[in-house]
Image (spheres, grey):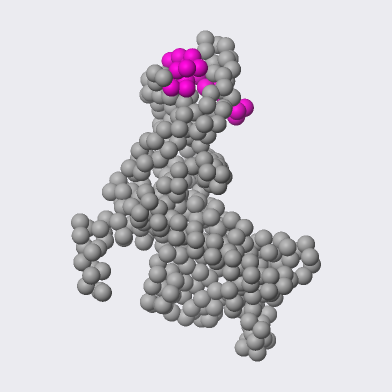
Amino acid sequence: MTDIFFTVFSIDGLLIGTILPFLIVLTVVVFVHEMGHYLVGRWCGIGVDAFSIGFGPELAGYTAANGTRWKLSAIPLGGYVKFMGEMTVSGNPDPDLPDSLTAEQLKSAFHVQPVWKRALTVVAGPMANFILAIAVFATMLAFNGRYIHDPVVAEVMPGSAADVAGFQPGDRFVSLDGQTVDTFADIQRYVSQRAEVPIAIVMRRDGKDLDFTLTPQLREIEDALGNKVKIGLLGVANSDEAGNGRLVRYGVVESVGQAVLQTWAAIEGTGAFLARFAVGREDKCQLGGPVKIADMAGRAAQKGVLWVVQLVALLSIGIGILNLFPIPPLDGGHLLFYGVESVIRGPVPTAVLELFYRIGFFMVLAFMGFVFWNDLFAC
């Protein structure tokens, strides 16, 4: 088995070119997510039995002075923090738990903490992912700035929605659905998420504002990493000359502010995609799993470190959003039950928790199976 493994992954430098970048990207994102849980949990006085990167058998690790076992496990597709007192599939304590912990340990067990401490500890994981994305974007903006273009039409594609509506070179976008646009990138970001959805557009031509309603056409394009993606397009192009292309530099505070806006835009975009996917308005091949992420990591590594770092930020946002879904055993599922617990002023019955957590596990496994099938066979 070992011989086969290394033979397969030595072909064409796949181990170095794809698998290694994938593991680096995923490990960083998972580590930050779990560290969010860990740090806030410790701040709340909750004991931690284990902090693991990966699942399954332990490959290496050590036990810290506070009793936490830090370890690297065999299956590098996630990780976990095991808080003191978590014993069952739903995170509830085992009925015999009081007998297995000292009085001092029982005080720091997860299940005895107030709801607000448990909720804060759980939500800290996704929040850490969003903070990582903000930090990455802010750093890139502070060091590199951003090249921007004014939202001016340089060219109208024949037969496009913009052409049919009568757009002309020199027209300037003022707003989309009432939202002011400042750069051509604002238009691309907004329109790409709204294929076949009418958009109210205000254009400025010769000093006068004109109202249009356009429906972006669904088109397949190739993104910067070579992925085939389907997005909405109006059929207009920009240029350095028409858009007054220029490099904008930001200070530290401005970089953070812009990074927050950029992260929020990515969150909105991901949320909009998932909403359309849920009602069948997105191609299933747009949703990928570990194999697709590994391929993207390999392509990003070929383009340079900055591309890998940017992929870390985008994947971190995706992981943060996914974990907030109100499905057990994801973080959002825990938060859902903490909300119920707050309303009913007491713990949710164990039998109910176990039932919903088992259903949740099945849903998560089904989703994983779906994206794996997409990666390997369907797309």
How many numbered circles does the render carry? 0
Residue 351 placement: quadrant = bottom right
Q: Can residue 38 be seen in this snapshot?
A: yes
Q: Nearer the viewer, residue 234 or 370?
A: 370
Q: Is residue 107 above or below residue 155?
A: below
Q: Is residue 306 left or right of residue 210?
A: left
State yes or no: residue 174 in magenta.
yes
State yes or no: residue 182 in magenta.
no
Determine the residue positioned at 43% across, 46% down. Answer: 286
Q: Is residue 174 above or below residue 291?
A: above
Q: Residue furthest top?
A: 206
Q: Which residues are magenta?
A: 160-179
Residue 274 location (% of width, % of height): 53, 46
Residue 110 location (% of width, % of height): 64, 74
Residue 215 location (% of width, % of height): 52, 26
Q: Nearer the viewer, residue 141 or 18?
A: 18
Q: Nearer the viewer, residue 43 or 269?
A: 269
Q: Quadrant of the N terminus?
A: bottom left
Q: Is residue 306 above or below residue 165?
A: below
Q: Residue furthest bottom?
A: 99
Q: Is residue 224 above or below residue 166?
A: below
Q: Nearer the viewer, residue 303 or 279?
A: 279
Determine the residue positioned at 35% across, 38% down. Answer: 222
Determine the residue positioned at 42% across, 47% down. Answer: 285
Determine the residue positioned at 36% across, 43% down. Answer: 227
Q: Can residue 155 be seen in this snapshot?
A: no
Residue 327 location (% of width, % of height): 60, 60
Residue 324 placement: quadrant = bottom right
